[in-house]
Amino acid sequence: MDELGVEAHGVTRSFGAVQALRGLELTVPYGQVTALVGPNGAGKTTLMLILATLLAPDTGQVRIAGYDLSTHPEQVRSSLGWMPDTFGVYDQLKVHEYLEFFADAYRLPRDEKGRRVRALLSLVRLEETAVRPVHALSRGQKQRLGLARALIHKPRVLLLDEPASGLDPRSRIELRDLLRSLAADGVAVLVSSHILSELEEIADRVAMVDHGRSAGEHRMTDLTSAGPAGLGGARWRIRALDPSGLVESLRVRPGFGLVSDLSGGAEVGPLTEEQAAGLLAELVAEGVRVVAYGPVGSALESAYLAMTESRR
């Protein structure tokens, strides 16, 4: 489909007796940021390496930017940008030379190369390091350089594995804004990360994987609204002037999830935002004097915990 930057169907991959991917399915639409979420050992890294054309699947079909990965790998590589969690750098090169090298590798015209390198150095805030040796950069600066490298040829599909690793808070915010901007320009963005709170701020949708299989794809808005069983909503923490009365009032109400007695109040849920709003209205109407009411963690965290409950 023209609307999909990435399509993977029935993808399998084994390493000896270990089956890393077991018929995995994935879609990444253009114009959206898709979060790839799953526990350690779920197959995320194997999948990302396959999408980046660095590892061949045993079976299944993968299409990137409309090209079949097995029959048109060169077209796939020219259409995607890849930023791994850790990557090697050419220590003998300066920062601007490093980007110029990859501009040449992607065959950017000479008159465009200089403008593109300068624009990317500005975009990732590395202008002042342009003539510094790559090996002298900090971990966070190397991450930003890696992002610039992935964007050098204006890819239609962007794959990022733990892109915020090593970044300071300001750089994380700027990364979030940049990814949102790229998606707004029509790029298909796939981000794999364990920092769920940041993914919830960046992503339009989430693709969950577990034990090498797809565990569902959902729009982020569906996680906070009435969605699939076990996915909608988060835990909500409530504080009241009369904590014991609050707990008693909550426990006589069916359909509001597990009630936990806390100092000064209680936790209840998981609840969707609509359910939480309804519960608050009922408590206030009943005369419960609520002084604080808000979600605990995030809906994405709740969905992740529900998915991985069997691993405990």
Image: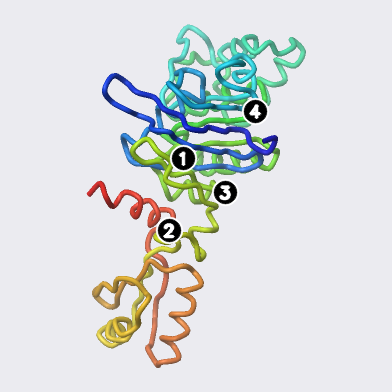
Whether tag 4 and tag 2 are in contact, CB under 8 A, the answer is: no
Q: Mark 4 or 2 closer to N-term?
A: 4
Disc 3 residue crowd, few under 14, some 14–19, many 20+, Cα 10 Å: some
Q: Mark 3 or 2 closer to N-term?
A: 3
Separation (CA) of disc 1 from disc 3: 11 Å
Q: Secondary structure at mark 2?
A: loop
The residue carrying mark 2 is 231
The residue carrying mark 1 is 36
Separation (CA) of disc 3 from disc 2: 16 Å
Using the image as rendered, state which of residue 176 and residue 10 is in the foreground: 10
Residue 28 sits in quarter: top right
Q: Mark 3 or 4 closer to N-term?
A: 4
The residue carrying mark 3 is 204
The residue carrying mark 4 is 65
Which of discs 1 and 2 lies nearer the camera? The answer is 2
Q: Residue at x 38, y 59 (%)?
A: 297
Q: Residue flagged by tag 2: what amino acid is it?
A: Leu
Q: Residue at x 28, y 19 (%)?
A: 16
In the rendered image, residue 105, in percent from the top left (x then y), is placed at 62, 10
Residue 250 sits in quarter: bottom left
Separation (CA) of disc 4 from disc 2: 30 Å
Q: Is residue 249 above or below residue 171?
A: below
Whether tag 3 and tag 4 are in contact, CB under 8 A, the answer is: no
